[in-house]
Every structure is written in structure tokens, then in C-alpha cells.
Amino acid sequence: MRRARAGSSPAASAVELGRAVLGVWHLSRSFRGRDQAVLHGVLGVRQLVQAALVARTGSGNAHTLSAAVDAVHGVTMVPLALDPRRRTFALQQVWIATVLTVAEVAVVGRGGRR
């Protein structure tokens, strides 16, 4: 009997769907020339690629790595928040990264065998 992959759960699918929607939102802001258009473009591509790879792989390790990427992203936004022109953008990204990190960790759970 095959074991279900972590990515095949409804929670995992919801996280990656949310990430893909976020990627599209970032790209739309980039294409409309909004504030921080280049950063929105880069993040949009990253979110879409990350969503596709994690959804495709679906393993607990993929979700753990995805959480680590989100956490690193959040940390890298902290210095950017010191720049008054980028503060709002950076703080939004810290919040988004925190939510995604927690969501990915919740999908994986404790990691023990069940």
C-alpha cells in the first residue's frame, strides 16, 4: 500500500494554491508599474515556481525547505524596512513570509511517523 505524500493533503494544496495566487498578485503589481515593481516581479516569479515545485514534489522535505525559503525571505526584508521608501513593502513581506512559514510548518507537523 502506498503512503500518502504530505503534499497530497487538502491543507498542503491550500497553501500552494495560496502561494500561487500571491505570485499572480505580485506579478500584476509588477506589470502595472506599482511601487517596487522590480521586487514584485521577482517575488511573483519565485512564488509561482516555489508553488509549482512544492506541489509537484509534495514531500514533507519539500514543505520544510519551502518554509526555510520563506523564513529567509522574511529575515532579508528586515534591513529593507529601515529604508523609509521601502518600509511598507518590506513589512508586508515580513508578514507574508511569516504566514507562509507557519503554514508550511503546519502542513509538515511534527514530522514523526503516524
Image (tube, grey):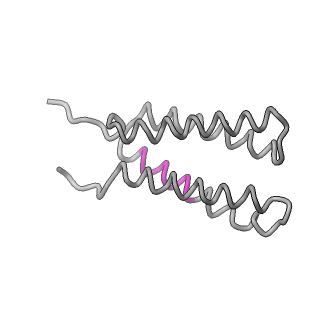
Label total for image = 0
Choose between 67 and 15: the one closer to the eye: 15
What segment carries the magenta color?
A: 62-71
Looking at the image, residue 1 sits to the left or right of residue 111; the answer is: left
**Residue 50 position in % (x across, y down):** 55, 39
Q: Is residue 77 above or below residue 59?
A: below
Q: Main secondary structure of the magenta part?
A: helix
Choose between 1 and 47: the one closer to the eye: 47
Q: Is residue 8 above or below residue 93?
A: above
**Residue 43 position in % (x across, y down):** 68, 43
Residue in the image at 75% along x and 59% along y? 88
Residue 46 image-quadrant placement = top right
Q: Is residue 105 above or below residue 40?
A: below
Q: Which quarter of the figure is the N terminus placed in? A: top left
Residue in the image at 62% along x and 64% along y? 75
Choose between 84 and 105: the one closer to the eye: 84
Residue in the image at 56% along x and 35% along y? 20
Residue in the image at 48% along x and 38% along y? 16
**Residue 107 position in % (x across, y down):** 36, 48
